[in-house]
Amino acid sequence: MAAGYLEILRARHAARLLAGTLVGRLPNATAAIAVVLFVRAEGGSYSLAGALAAVYGVANAVGQPVLGRLVDLHGQPRVQLPAALASAVAMAVFAFTGVDPLPLAYAAVGAAGLFTPPLEGGLRALWPSVLRREDQVHTAYAMDAIAQEVMFTVGPLLVTLCVSLWSAEAALLVLNVLGVLGALSVVVSAPSRAWRSAPREAHWLGALRSPGLLVLLGAFLFIGMALGSITVASVPYADDHGGDAVYGWLMAALGLGALLGGSVYGARSWPGAPERRLRVLVALLAGCYLPLTLMPGAVAMVALTALAGVFLAPAIACAFVIVDRHAPSGTVTEAFSWLVTTFTVGASVGTGVAGPVVEAGSYTHLTLPTTSSV
């Protein structure tokens, strides 16, 4: 299993690009968790936390394909680094001003999401120039998905660690500084500076003129909704079963399950059309979410959350191959960014809906005086 991944990492620039993208995406990957914990620390409600996280997600969804198209047109360094700096500054404004005044909080969170650099799409556009064989590129897509799950495993723990050692405000600031450093590492690399998009046909729809891509995006909208709802729904569960530490473990378990599933999936070549394989993976992913409704004790819930993530990374890795097959010429970064956008929109919808649902279902619990509210 390790041999194929090591072959990829030994390729020149591969490890640096993967690590830089991983670190650069930390602010985006942990934004929903960090915003929820920050709003709660500021005395805000679950509904407000969900709404602000949803604003970030929607703004991110709008910005990714726009920035992705700009990368295809103008190259990576001229777009990625300025966007990373703008996003970090906006989140710093939110961290320093808090939720009051509320319009400024919404504006700052929205700007942070809007200017999040499309590092994911950029990395996937770079793989063919770094790895010369097609089978290596497909393995790199799987490794890319696995690396994301490492980030989704470590990221929540890093957020809760920063909150425990310092504050929720410090967590927002630290993560965004790391994000800028990761983006800088990528854009100053030789492959990023040398990369140019393939010739493209002028069309206002860009990558969206591909019917196959549109079908894929529709599927990932609903996958994002399921994942986004867990981010908020896990908070009151954790409050009743151990607090922030349990919440961090639940979020990390989801990433750990995907990490394990992705590692097994990427260790071999799969026959047949990736479109058919994706249908099977999505069905298995949906089936593994159902046991979460049992809501057992904390240890069992962490285990079930890990199970819910097992087929996530394989589904994402399979989707990367499909995007590469269906993206029109010259739109590869934009096409991968649309996948991120659709997934983010779905997660934002799930996050935004889960907040009021959790609050309505837990109304009695939330209004009773407890020692934690002192």
Image (cartoon, rainbow, N blue to C red):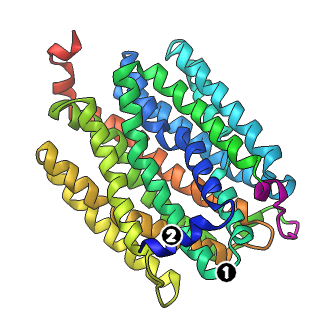
Q: Is residue 47 shown to the viewer in this render? A: no
Residue 143, percent from left and from top = 51, 65
Which of 190/73 is in front?
A: 190
Q: Residue furthest left?
A: 297
Residue 327 rendering spot, x and y as whole percentages: 70, 72
Q: How many marks?
A: 2
| Kind of residue indicated by mark 1 | Arg
Q: Label 2 vs label 1: CA separation?
A: 14 Å
Q: Which mark is residue 133?
A: 1
Whether label 2 touches label 1, CB < 8 Å: no
Question: Which residues are the magenta region?
Answer: 190-202
Q: Residue at image x 15%, y 14%?
A: 371
**Quadrant of the rendered image containing residue 256:** bottom left
Residue at 77%, 59% (x, y): give it: 191
Rendered view: 163 above or below 125 = above
- The C terminus lies in quadrant: top left
**Residue under pointer 2:** 5
Residue 129 shown left or right of residue 107 in the figure: right
